Image (cartoon, grey):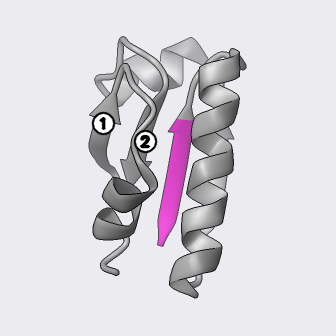
Amino acid sequence: MEIKVLGPGCPKCAEAEKLVREAVAEAGIEAQVVKVSDFQEMAALGVFATPAIVVDGAVKCSGKVPSKKELLAWLGK
């Protein structure tokens, strides 16, 4: 599983990345967490509001920090 955290590095983006890493650890799954701060790559994924979370190529949220409960649901837990 590949999870991308999209954002330029603002505090909300850092919070989103932290929550993603916590959710992956809590779920006990194998996942590669990638931080994406390149605006062209974000635009190519159709994301124009950050932070955003992309799980295996599917944009799960954009423009907000998801809850850990939402993250766990996206991870299948």
For residue 32, which quarter of the picture?
Answer: bottom right
**Within-10-Å neighbours for mark 1: few <14, some 14–19, many 20+:** some
Residue at mark 2 to residue at mark 1: CA–CA distance? 5 Å
Which of the pair 32/22 is nearer the observer? 22
| Position in image of residue 37 (x %, y %) | 65, 23
Q: Is residue 4 magenta?
A: yes
22 relative to 77 in the view: left or right: right
Predominant SS along the magenta part = strand
> Which residues are the magenta region?
1-5
Which of the pair 2/49 is nearer the observer? 49
Sequence-wise, the earlier of marks 2 and 1 is 2
Residue name at image x 54 percent, y 66 percent: 23
Q: Are marks 2 and 1 in contact (CB under 8 Å)?
A: yes
11 relative to 74 in the view: left or right: right
Residue name at image x 51 percent, y 81 percent: 27
Q: Amino acid at mark 1?
A: Cys
Q: Considering the image in quadrants, where does the C terminus appear? A: bottom left
